[in-house]
Image (spheres, grey):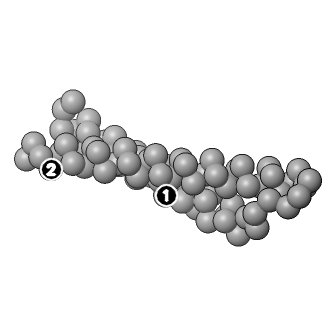
Amino acid sequence: MDEAVKNKKIADLEIKLAIYKERLAEKKKWNRGIKHEDSLSELRYMQYMVARDMVDGLERELNKLRDTVIIKR
């Protein structure tokens, strides 16, 4: 992968990460765990977990890309 392409991908991932971190913060406000037999709390919990996994995945991918850019320099 070309250096310019990697830098563009890193910039794009940083933008996505910022967006998903905002979503995660919003979901975290409403996450109170799962109440027994409450479908709304289950839905909110699942949305929170998806947002958290997206942030974790984006951070891992960014770190991996940054490591390859630093190693080649």
Q: Residue furthest front?
A: 36
Q: Residue furthest left?
A: 73
Between label 1 and label 2, give the one nearer the viewer: 2
Q: Residue at x 62, y 57 (%)?
A: 23
Q: Residue 56 vs residue 20: left or right?
A: left
Q: Quadrant of residue 40?
A: bottom right
Which residue has dot 1 on it?
Answer: 18
Would residue 22 be found to the left or right of residue 26 on screen? Answer: left
Q: Secondary structure at mark 1?
A: helix
30 in relation to 23, above or below: below
In the rendered image, the quadrant that contains the N terminus is: top left
Q: Which residue is mark 2?
A: 70
Label 2: element kind: helix
Identify residue type, mark 1. Ala
Residue 55 at x, y percent in the picture: 50, 52
- Left or right of residue 3: residue 24: right
Which residue is located at x 47 percent, y 52 percent? Answer: 56
Q: Quadrant of residue 72?
A: top left
